[in-house]
Image (spheres, coloured by chain):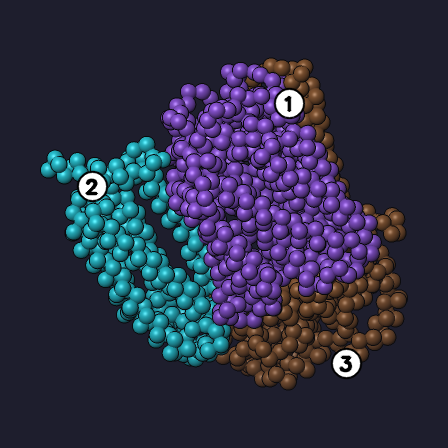
């Protein structure tokens, strides 16, 4: 057992003061991270509930469980909640918020009040969007394609658009805070080459948040204005161009998937190094790959529009660029794998999730190559193939990474260990459940099953039943951590400052960290992932 | 002199937030943050600029007709007003830097006046457009005035006006926020919040104000001027 | 293929083989890399587990390796890029002699109109072995024309024509899906593509299932007279508007110096938004017909203007009449 101080409980960010006000008015990045954790967990369950309803409806070919309008609202709300209110804030706003200042050796983010404001904006956006959903729902799909969203939908599009508009500013402010913090708040000796890869990838994601989010904000504002005043900007009957909406929408929403996945990649880099006891293989290449993804990610948006009526030559250019953005992702996968070579590997839960991430992200990434092949994309575009690809990257990749990171830093956040055996079981269930849910969708997609179909031809049923069965396993895999994480708050073993014997500044302070993070400003004299000089000891806690 | 210096430094120390090592770091950080924020703002407006350019290319004549309805005199006056306000803003920042809070307050108050002047003139223009049914929506009405292009579709002019209202409206909203921020600086400045050692808020609001002016410097020619004489 | 549990779509167009070939190659390459990564992870995880390998060997990285796994995937990707683009180019270029079907999509229905004027709803009858070009537009929101068995898909937009083409190679009935979400009954916006042998197709055609009243182009000609187009667009040089004989798929010189191709979308735009592109030497006097012609009538008009190109050499005065057009061409 770790040597926890038994007599007087050390002051930390959780017990420094109490009361609801001390949380709602806090400017401590760690408390704000916890606020985010609670809010996005709620959103995850809500979005997950809608997903489960969708899968239940798809058990039978006929649309018999819910009406088609209800079904359309279900997948729209699933998409909006999961994309804008779970995936985008998940790793940056929870883990990034908690860890970036700790990792660079700062007392807080550069703008603590702005950080709190961003949580309030997130909540305001979420409540606005949820109000729109509760009072009638939205049925446009999370993509809000015009002119359907502006003219033909009879649902609460304005409310949902305004909700996302507001939440967008939360994302912008978080990104801005990360960029400034990483530039200006690093501890003495924490050079760019010593920066943890988690910070590099959050930095890259933050660049996208700052540059991309305003464009979706203004686009959705135009959609809302068009609905309210019929201004005609996207309405072809008034001379507007619906394709302009798609360009503006994907200019953000494609890079947005990199906002989602890049921080997850950072989590995996940390975990693979820690449980292999090794410096990251090709540290510079992993770091630069993050930046390359962020930059190239801005240049590929029209690959969502190969069949939308864009010119052949535009399609050619965007196809080529889409292949290029695949390369840095591949570089990362190869480097993680190579990091394990001649390591000293232990199979703790975060590492199991990381294995899952690397495998599933590989599948997700490779199927992305299918979609960037012009001739093939024509066939699989807007089918379940795209659904499967997206979920392999987002759920198999991003959510796996989020779970990995949550297990890895749970001892740091709460000071308690989660139960290792249950956690390993949940990792296994998630992996099996996930593949059962989403692999059949690749096959369905190539057979031509279109997405967003409430009822489908009967020959597609067997694979749909398989997928729904997998979804129920996946659900159990997600419910378990929810239970044992809460359980561990009271009954978990004390973690001690560094249960994984990991390197990195966040492990050099107590768990949970004190309000000011470090008793004195750390001075960094060692290289990143300096596992060579970290004394080797067996991990004994947490059983 | 020496005592006031010490006083300044004490004010500065009070202004130093706990998570910064020193004033220098705090100053650099906040100004860096402001620049990042302005980058976001540029992207925010660029979505609209992009829509404007696309539609201007598609419906050139309709856009020319729309821009004929702009009051160039008022627009030019407003441009001058904003440039003057930027000057007083810059002088105000300089005054704060030199440790002259009263001078700063006066200069910033003039800036606010210019700001209100801009909004007032803009309101006159908006009113003109409103009574002429040049507001997009069910009441929109537009007579094509160019005999050379009778076929020009009023609908496409409506898109011009949609973009005009959206862009200038968003700009005006930024002006309102800017006026609020400058007013806050005046009050805080008179209460002695800023010294030569600590005036980053003044500097940052100044950056914001200049940015908002700069947006107008692009909006004015795009909406009022560049299509004006090319109707034929 | 199993009847009730198929794992692969039917292959019923000339292009389907190419798409499938690319697909199989991609599967092979993806499977190789996926297995490579899985195997490497598994092997390292077992071989270097802490109980047998307690001390990690620190390795900084390797430039040759980094270059290898940057450049090799890049090279492989370029092969896919080239192949995928070749297929896309073929899909984008319909053969000149393809039979044409006009499609109007609306919530939640597919309306087809054949060259002979016959109409179909949610059923598309085609002869096997002939190239078919679909000229499509939507009456309301965006839809997408998707026939999995042909491996083709194209969005159907309001306010403009989009086209796609294919050559059915196998007699049978195939799914037609709308693949762009379009509202409440999106999943009911489905239909059948019925590919028939030429004899059966002829029989169906002469059966007059749609109750046609003349060919599409003839209907267009009638409209052309009714709407008064013919008063200006005369078949000689005296008209106030450009002569339309021989116009289609020729370049047109505009008064601002640009040259555009007279394709379906150009004709459509000239009817609905005549001020957008003024032919050199003419005055912008044509009124807009936006809101006055339905999507179907618009297609008939376009079909008529296109038919004028095919009947170009009519002798006599018409030979001269085509002169102003060609003189506009630079």
Tint applied to chain A in the drawing:
purple
Q: Residues within 10 Å of mark 2 (few under 14, many from 20)?
A: some
Q: Chain of mark 1?
A: A
A209 or C323: nearer the eye?
A: A209
Q: Which mark is residue C196?
A: none
Tint applied to chain C in the drawing:
brown
Q: Chain of mark 2?
A: B
Specify the quadrant of the image occupied by residue C208: bottom right
A62 or A26: nearer the eye?
A: A26
> Please, what secondary structure does the residue beneath circle 1 have?
loop
Question: In the picture shown, does residue A527 fall above or below A234?
Answer: above
The answer to whether residue C134 is visible is no
Q: Gap between marks 1 and 2, in whole Å?
A: 57 Å
The answer to whether residue A49 is visible is yes
- Name the residue tied to disc 1: A346
Q: Quadrant of the C terminus of chain A?
A: top right
> Please, what secondary structure does the residue beneath circle 2 have?
loop
Describe residue B177's horizontal placement relative to residue A450 as left or right: left
> Please, what secondary structure does the residue beneath circle 3 have?
loop
Q: From this viewpoint, which residue is outermost toward the left?
A: B1
Q: Which mark is residue B196?
A: 2
Question: In the picture shown, does residue A500 fall above or below C162?
Answer: above
Do the dots labelled 3 and 2 sit on one chain? no
Q: From this viewpoint, which residue is outermost toward the front?
A: A7
A504 or A146: nearer the eye?
A: A504
- Name the residue tied to disc 3: C213
Tint applied to chain B in the drawing:
cyan
């Amino acid at each position: 057992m770790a040597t926890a101080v038994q007599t007087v409980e050390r002051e930390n960010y959780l017990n420094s003061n109490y009361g609801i006000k001390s949380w709602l008015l806090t400017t401590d990045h760690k408390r704000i991270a916890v606020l985010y954790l609670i809010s996005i967990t709620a959103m995850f369950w809500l979005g997950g509930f809608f997903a489960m309803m969708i899968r239940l409806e798809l058990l039978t070919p006929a649309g018999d469980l819910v009406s088609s309008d209800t079904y359309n609202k279900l997948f729209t709300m699933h998409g909006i909640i999961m994309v804008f209110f779970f995936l985008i804030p998940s790793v940056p706003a929870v883990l990034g918020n908690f860890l970036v200042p700790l990792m660079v050796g700062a007392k807080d983010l550069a703008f603590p009040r702005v950080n709190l404001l961003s949580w309030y904006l997130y909540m305001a956006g979420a409540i606005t969007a949820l109000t729109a959903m509760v009072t009638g729902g939205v049925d446009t799909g999370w993509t809000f394609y015009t002119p359907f969203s502006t003219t033909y939908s009879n649902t609460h599009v304005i409310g949902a658009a305004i909700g996302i508009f507001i939440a967008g500013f939360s994302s912008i402010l978080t990104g801005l805070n990360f960029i400034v913090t990483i530039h200006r708040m690093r501890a003495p000796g924490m050079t760019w080459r010593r920066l943890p890869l988690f910070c590099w990838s959050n930095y890259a994601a933050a660049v996208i948040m700052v540059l991309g989010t305003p464009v979706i904000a203004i686009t959705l504002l135009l959609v809302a204005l068009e609905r309210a005043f019929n201004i005609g900007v996207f309405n072809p009957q008034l001379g507007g161009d619906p394709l302009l909406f798609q360009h503006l929408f994907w200019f953000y929403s494609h890079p947005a998937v990199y906002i989602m996945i890049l921080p997850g990649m950072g989590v995996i880099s940390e975990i693979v190094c820690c449980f292999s006891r090794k410096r990251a293989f090709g540290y510079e290449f992993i770091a630069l790959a993050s930046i390359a993804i962020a930059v190239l990610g801005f240049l590929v948006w029209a690959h969502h529009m190969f069949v939308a009526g864009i010119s052949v030559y535009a399609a050619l250019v965007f196809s080529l660029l889409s292949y290029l953005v695949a390369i840095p992702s591949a570089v990362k996968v190869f480097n993680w794998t190579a990091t394990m070579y001649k390591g000293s590997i232990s199979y703790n839960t975060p590492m199991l999730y990381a294995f899952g991430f690397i495998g599933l992200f590989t599948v997700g990434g490779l199927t992305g190559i299918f979609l960037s092949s012009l001739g093939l994309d024509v066939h699989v575009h807007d089918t379940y193939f795209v659904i499967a690809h997206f979920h392999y990257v987002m759920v198999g990749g991003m959510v796996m990474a989020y779970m990995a990171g949550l297990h890895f830093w749970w001892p740091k956040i709460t000071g308690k260990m989660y139960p290792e055996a249950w956690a390993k079981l949940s990792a296994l269930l998630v992996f099996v459940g996930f593949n059962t849910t989403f692999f059949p969708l690749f096959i369905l997609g190539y057979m031509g099953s279109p997405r967003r179909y409430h009822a489908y031809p009967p020959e597609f049923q067997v694979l749909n039943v398989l997928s729904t069965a997998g979804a129920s396993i996946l659900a159990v895999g997600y419910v378990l951590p929810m239970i044992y994480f809460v359980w561990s708050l009271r009954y978990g073993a004390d973690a001690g400052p560094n249960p994984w014997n990991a390197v990195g500044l966040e492990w050099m302070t107590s768990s949970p960290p004190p309000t000011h993070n470090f008793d004195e400003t750390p001075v960094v004299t060692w290289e990143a992932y300096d596992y060579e000089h970290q004394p080797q000891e067996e991990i004994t806690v947490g059983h | 002199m020496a005592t006031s210096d010490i006083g300044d430094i004490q004010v500065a120390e009070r202004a130093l937030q706990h998570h910064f090592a020193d004033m220098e770091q705090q100053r650099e950080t906040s100004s860096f943050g402001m620049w990042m924020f302005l980058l976001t703002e540029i992207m925010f407006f660029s979505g609209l600029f992009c829509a404007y350019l696309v539609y201007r290319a598609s419906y050139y004549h309709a856009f020319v007709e729309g821009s004929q309805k702009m009051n160039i005199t008022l627009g030019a006056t407003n441009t001058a007003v904003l440039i003057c306000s930027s000057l007083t803003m810059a002088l105000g920042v300089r005054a704060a830097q030199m440790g002259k809070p009263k001078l700063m307050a006066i200069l910033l108050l003039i800036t606010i006046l210019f700001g209100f002047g801009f909004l007032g003139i803009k309101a006159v223009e908006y009113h003109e457009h409103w009574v002429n049914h040049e507001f997009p929506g069910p009441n929109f009405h537009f007579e094509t005035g160019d005999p050379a292009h009778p076929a020009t579709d009023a609908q496409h002019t409506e898109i011009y006006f949609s973009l005009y209202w959206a862009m200038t409206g968003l700009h005006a909203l930024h002006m309102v926020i800017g006026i609020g921020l400058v007013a806050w600086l005046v009050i805080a400045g008179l209460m002695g919040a800023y010294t030569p050692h600590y005036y980053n808020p003044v500097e940052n609001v100044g950056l914001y104000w200049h940015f908002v002016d700069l947006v107008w410097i692009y909006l004015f020619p795009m909406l009022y001027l560049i299509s004006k004489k090319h109707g034929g | 293929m199993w009847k009730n549990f198929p794992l692969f779509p039917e292959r019923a167009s000339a292009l389907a083989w190419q798409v499938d070939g690319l697909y199989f190659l991609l599967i092979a390459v993806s499977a190789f890399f996926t297995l490579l990564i899985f195997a490497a992870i598994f092997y390292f995880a077992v071989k270097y587990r802490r109980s047998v390998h307690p001390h990690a060997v620190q390795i900084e990285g390797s430039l040759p390796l980094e270059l290898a796994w940057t450049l090799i995937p890049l090279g492989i990707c370029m092969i896919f890029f080239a192949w995928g683009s070749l297929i896309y180019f073929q899909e984008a270029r319909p053969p000149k002699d393809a039979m044409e079907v006009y499609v109007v999509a609306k919530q939640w229905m597919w309306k087809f109109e054949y060259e002979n004027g016959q109409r179909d709803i949610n059923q598309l009858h085609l002869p096997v072995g002939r190239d078919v070009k679909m000229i499509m537009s939507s009456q309301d929101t965006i839809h997408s024309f998707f026939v999995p068995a042909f491996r083709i898909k194209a969005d159907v937009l309001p306010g403009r024509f989009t086209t796609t083409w294919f050559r059915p190679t196998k007699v049978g009935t195939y799914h037609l899906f709308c693949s762009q979400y379009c509202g409440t009954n999106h999943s009911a916006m489905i239909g059948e593509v019925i590919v028939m042998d030429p004899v059966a197709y002829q029989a169906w055609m002469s059966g007059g299932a749609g109750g046609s009243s003349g060919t599409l182009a003839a209907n267009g000609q009638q409209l052309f007279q009714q709407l008064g187009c013919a008063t200006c667009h005369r078949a000689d040089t005296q008209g106030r508007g450009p002569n339309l004989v021989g116009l289609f798929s020729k370049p047109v010189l505009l008064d601002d110096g640009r040259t555009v191709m007279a394709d379906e979308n150009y004709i459509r735009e000239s009817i609905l938004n005549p001020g957008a592109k003024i032919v050199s030497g003419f005055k912008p006097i044509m009124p807009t017909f936006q809101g006055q012609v339905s999507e179907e009538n618009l297609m008939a008009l376009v079909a008529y203007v296109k038919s004028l190109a095919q009947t170009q050499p009519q002798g006599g005065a018409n030979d001269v009449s085509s002169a102003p057009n060609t003189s506009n061409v630079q």
